[in-house]
């Protein structure tokens, strides 16, 4: 009824399929398994020799000790992806005279004013320091990075200041030198507060202005031209390619983040059955 050739045609796909069950798969089950094809070396460029060392072009790593803040990387990226911005670190603080604070500590006007200013910094730790004559409330536990103090003001303080003005507070600029400092004197009746956005000095001798690059990984195309352009070998690209985040802003890496070797990313939870299958696939 069935000829030999018909049987062969009928069973050969089945046999071929069965044979492949015993082959080692060439696909990998990312993120539980990682590819071994990514080189472990950083991509880097030696400006003295004019030689690029092969390596994976993943997330950058910035050496703060070498970066002079020259901005060459920023200018190089300008016509590619505009992913780099040269930024300063700022601290934001409120200063109030000790005596004045003691006199008005139970005055609701003072509490309301402080609450309004602190509104934008809800998640941050507030450090209160006592100086000789003042209390200083630091509004952020880490520097706020930006290219101008005015932009920090617009992003974090403008709404609160406008609200204070509506409530009858007088707000005057007492010191202003862009991009370094912006200070406000906020007063009502006899209560006086000082609010300041002040550029930080990170204390690197080779970078007296304390200006460093920040990278927006929502724009970066990982071409590596910024690494090639850096005259001081201060920036390299690491084999870290796992940069997925839930919020767009988390793709903005400030200089401190860029100088940190690794940010761990964890794959989703696996159950015991998946773990067993992964192990079988790995060791077959
Ligand atoms: S690697 Fe990214 S940041 Fe560097 S030049 Fe290319 S696009 Fe710009
Ligand atoms: S990383 Fe290099 S090119 Fe960029 S600002 Fe620093 S020293 Fe200049």
Image (spheres, rainbow, N blue to C red):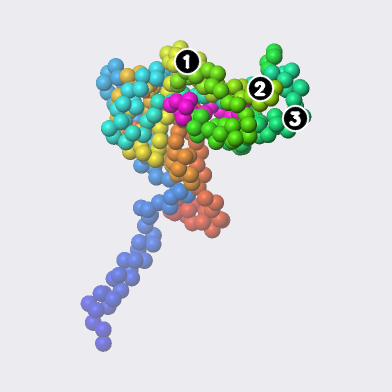
The stretch drawn in magenta includes residue 150: yes
Can residue 16 be seen here? The reply is yes
Is-magenta flag for residue 143?
yes
Q: In this picture, is 254 found above or below 33?
A: above
Mark 3, secondary structure of its residue: loop
Res 96 quadrant in image: top right
Label placed on residue 83: none
The residue singled out by tag 2 in the image is: 192
Q: Residues in magenta?
A: 138-151
For the residues bearing labels 2 and 1, Cβ distance under 8 angstroms = no
Instruction: Classify mark 1: helix, strand or loop.
Output: loop
The reply, left or right, for residue 73 in relation to residue 271 is left
Query: What residue is pinned by disc 1?
Result: 204
Q: Residue at the bottom extreme? A: 1
Q: Tell me the residue that label 3 is attached to.
A: 107
Residue drawn at point x = 56 percent, y = 34 percent: 162
- Label 2: which secondary element: strand
Ligand 2: does it lie within 8 Å of the C-beta at label 3? no
State the image coordinates of residue 157 (x, y, percent, origin top left).
55, 32
Residue 150 lies, with reference to residue 20, above or below; the image says above
Q: In the image shown, does 143 or 119 lie closer to the viewer? A: 119
């Amino acid at each position: 009824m069935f000829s030999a050739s018909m049987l062969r045609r009928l069973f050969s796909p089945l046999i071929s399929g069965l044979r492949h069950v015993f082959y080692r798969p060439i696909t990998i089950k990312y993120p539980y398994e990682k590819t071994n094809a990514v080189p472990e070396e950083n991509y880097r460029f030696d400006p003295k020799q004019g030689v690029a060392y092969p390596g994976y072009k993943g997330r950058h790593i910035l050496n703060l000790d070498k970066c002079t803040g020259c901005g060459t990387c920023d200018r190089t990226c300008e016509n590619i992806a505009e992913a780099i911005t040269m930024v300063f670190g700022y601290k934001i603080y409120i200063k109030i005279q000790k005596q004045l604070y003691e006199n008005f500590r139970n005055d609701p006007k003072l509490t309301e004013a402080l609450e309004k200013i602190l509104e934008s910094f809800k998640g941050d730790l507030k450090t209160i320091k006592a100086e000789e004559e003042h209390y200083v409330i630091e509004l952020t536990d880490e520097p706020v990075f930006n290219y101008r103090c005015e932009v920090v003001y617009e992003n974090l303080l403008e709404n609160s200041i406008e609200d204070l003005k509506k409530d009858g507070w007088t707000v005057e600029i007492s010191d202003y030198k862009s991009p370094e400092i912006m200070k406000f004197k906020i007063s009502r009746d006899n209560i006086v507060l000082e609010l300041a956005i002040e550029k930080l000095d990170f204390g690197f001798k080779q970078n007296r202005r304390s200006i460093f690059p920040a990278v927006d990984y929502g724009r970066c195309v990982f071409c590596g031209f910024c690494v090639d352009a850096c005259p001081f070998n201060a920036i390299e690209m690491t084999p870290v390619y796992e940069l997925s985040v839930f919020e767009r802003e988390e793709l903005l890496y400030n200089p401190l983040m860029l100088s940190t070797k690794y940010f761990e990313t964890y794959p989703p939870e696996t159950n015991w059955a998946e773990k067993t299958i992964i192990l079988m696939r790995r060791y077959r």
